[in-house]
Amino acid sequence: MNIRSILLAGLLSTAAAAAFAQTPAQMHEAATVLDTHFDTPANFGAEGWSIMERHDVAVDGTQVDYPRMVEGGVDGGVFVIFTPQRGRGPAADAEARDHAFVRAAEILQMTAREHEHFALVTTPAEAAAAEAAGKKFVFISIENGAPVAGDLTLMDTFYKLGVRMMGPVHFANNDLADSSTDPKGPEWGGLSEKGRAFVTRANQLGVVIDPSHASDRTLDQILDLSTAPVILSHSGVKAVYDHPRNIPDNLLRKLAAKGGVIQVNAFSGYMVDVPRIPERQAALAALTAKYGQRRDVAAENRDAYLAELAAIEAAYPLPQANLDDLMKHILHVVEVAGIDHVGLSGDFDGGGGIEGLEDVTTFPTLTERLVAAGFTQEDLNKFWGGNALRVFAEVQAAAAR
């Protein structure tokens, strides 16, 4: 082949490569996009709120609905049964159990009512089938073990209802484990005996354990005791921002060695310094007392509520994390743990959301940042859903064995 032929061949191959090169938007569309922590079921009981209608985070504060999932290229999510830790003992256990049953029923009702658009799934294979059918897939998780803490046989009951992920603890210590954020400090030194039984039963059932709110020692013990990998469904890393909710590098490496995944959390308070302003807290409390929770504000009061909220925000502004902060967490996980052990959760409808990632419609913007940072299509496939779905499959396979 002469020089002219070589040059021509080179030009043709370059043109062909350019023709097949994908844009970030196309790469995003090609990936299965899964957020592992949607607190959206808290909206299901709000009067007049429908997941099939498009909402606006600036108006009602909500961040996930079907039209916005479509716009953001989101294929599915882990929809959360969140139960606050309001107390302990038989009465509190019963209240938590009943609260969780109501929330579970609301999720099941939503997926049944909107079955043409959503599919309740319990396995990665079912999620793939739902995606192929053009539906958004819905896994169910329990955040905070309070609903089952009084009676661990309830883990089996919730499993039968479709729950495939459970977290033992939330903001405060409970009968299962120590929290990372309880102001009283550790109570059990990690897991209680009942907490150890919780881990064992989750492994037997094929339920993914989610230690997102657990103390470092609790996480360490779960990694030792569990016979399957775990998922931190919405957490960050201490090396980037030192907060009790974020995990240190030694546990990040141990999580990866176990085959687990950390879904990086887009939550300002765990990414940048957010001061507590008593006057702001008092003003927001008064606003809620006057109008109710943001998602419940009556239509005729909406404009007045938003005007008063804007005045509070202007009087007492708070710093907000942005995509640069989020990328620092993501890139640190990739460096320390590897691309096979990272994903994302916006913690949407649960307090999450940062500048540039305000709701699910903005997920393609993050893909643009990831591509600019050198992520390939294979990387994106793992990041956006493949890693988490792998853990679901491995946990279920371990239980079957």
Image (cartoon, helix red, strand yellow):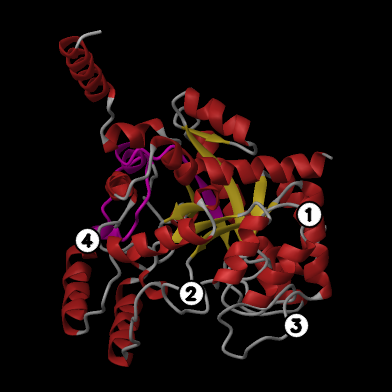
Do tag 1 and tag 2 residues touch (Cβ < 8 Å)? no
Rendered location of residue 231, percent (x, y): 60, 56
* The disc label shown at residue 188, or none: 3
Mark count = 4
Which dot marks residue 227? 1
Dot 2 amino acid type: Lys
Residue 7 at x, y percent in the picture: 18, 17
Q: Quadrant of residue 50?
A: top left
The segment highlighted magenta reads 52-80
Front-lying residue, 298 or 188 = 188
Disc 2 or 4, which lies upstream in sequence? 2
Along the line of sight, which residue is nearer the eye, 302 or 388? 388
Residue at image position (67%, 78%) is 178
Which residue position is annotated with label 4? 300
- SS for tag 2? loop
- Secondary structure beneath dot 4 equals helix
Residue density around tag 1, few if under 14, some if 14–19, many if 20 or more, within 10 Å: some
On the image, the x and y values in percent for residue 272 come to: 34, 76
Q: Does the magenta stretch include residue 322?
A: no
Dot label at residue 238 = 2
Which mark lies nearer to you, 3 or 2? 2
Is 53 placed left or right of 116 in the picture? left
Residue at 32 percent of width and 53 percent of height: 359
